[in-house]
């Protein structure tokens, strides 16, 4: 049973001929991109993708999905994963450090579908730390500001490289753990007012549908 694959493949059913697609990042979106590639090959549908990361760019190229950009096109449908989803469709994203481009793409789409397995569904956001992308030179002052807001912070370290994770945009990521996130919408706005913050991983707007892979089958919320 592969719940991420179930959700990703289901979302690909919403792709229509001629669509411009926002291609999210991560292990769940992997299956969406794969299935879109299969539909291009088998059904001959005509779509183009706007990637949210080097990961989704490379995967899209592997599946022969034509690539375009926001300079050229508006997005009909964006499909993306999440690290947490609450009952009001607020999200935490950025477990793969891709949330800045994801937010640009997802928020600009006419329709935004989130795909997750059931482990990502929560009553309240916050067990997963909020990823905050920062200009490297601002790390210390941003951490000070985040701590003043009640978070405990860590600069995310790379696993197969010495030193910090460097995002696709050349920045650091601070993982900010808040005890409670009372208002995702306010926190999303407040975090972005700290000088040096590029973007944070709270997504409190724009989600049209959540597709959840569960052990009892697909649920569409
Ligand atoms: O930065 C990464 C993205 O926000 C991902 O969409 C998110 O972390 C979920 O990834 P996965 O589907 O691999 O759990």
Image (cartoon, rainbow, N blue to C red):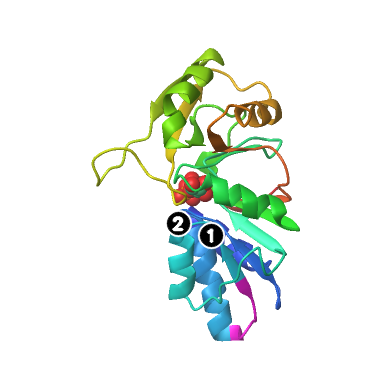
Q: Range of the magenta residues?
A: 43-48
- Residue 209 in percent (x, y) is at 70, 51
Give left or right: position of 65 versus 107. left
The quarter holding residue 152 reads top left
Other-residue count near label 2 (Cα within 10 Å), few / some / many at <14 / 14–19 / ≥20: few
Q: Are marks 1 and 2 in contact (CB under 8 Å)?
A: yes
The residue that mark 1 highlights is 6
- Residue 163 in percent (x, y) is at 27, 38
Element under label 1?
helix
- Residue 5 in percent (x, y) is at 49, 60
Residue at left offset 53%, top offset 84%: 41
The quarter holding residue 159 reads top left
* 182 versus 107 height, above or below: above
Does the magenta segment cover residue 216? no
* 2 versus 172 height, above or below: below
Viewer-proximal residue, 166 or 84?
166
Element under label 2?
loop
The residue that mark 2 highlights is 2
- Residue 98 in percent (x, y) is at 49, 48
Other-residue count near label 1 (Cα within 10 Å), few / some / many at <14 / 14–19 / ≥20: many
């Amino acid at each position: 049973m592969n719940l991420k694959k179930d959700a990703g493949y289901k979302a690909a059913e919403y792709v229509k001929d001629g669509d411009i697609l926002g291609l999210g990042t991560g292990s769940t979106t992997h299956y969406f991109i794969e299935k879109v590639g299969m539909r291009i090959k088998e059904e001959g549908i005509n779509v183009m993708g706007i990637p949210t990361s080097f990961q989704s760019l490379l995967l899209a190229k592997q599946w022969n999905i034509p690539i375009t950009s926001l300079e050229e096109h508006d997005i009909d449908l964006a499909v993306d994963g999440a690290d947490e989803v609450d009952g009001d469709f607020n999200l935490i994203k950025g477990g793969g450090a891709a949330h800045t481009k994801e937010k640009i793409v997802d928020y600009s789409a006419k329709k935004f579908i989130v795909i997750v397995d059931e482990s990502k569904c929560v009553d309240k956001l916050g067990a997963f730390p909020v990823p905050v992308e920062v200009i490297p030179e601002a790390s210390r002052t941003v951490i000070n500001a985040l701590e003043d807001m009640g978070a405990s912070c860590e600069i995310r370290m790379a696993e197969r490289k010495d030193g910090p994770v460097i995002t696709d945009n050349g920045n650091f990521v601070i993982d900010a753990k808040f005890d409670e996130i009372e208002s995702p919408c306010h926190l999303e706005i407040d975090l972005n007012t700290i000088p040096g913050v590029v973007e944070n991983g709270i997504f409190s707007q724009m989600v049209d549908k959540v597709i959840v892979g569960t052990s009892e089958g697909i649920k569409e919320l």
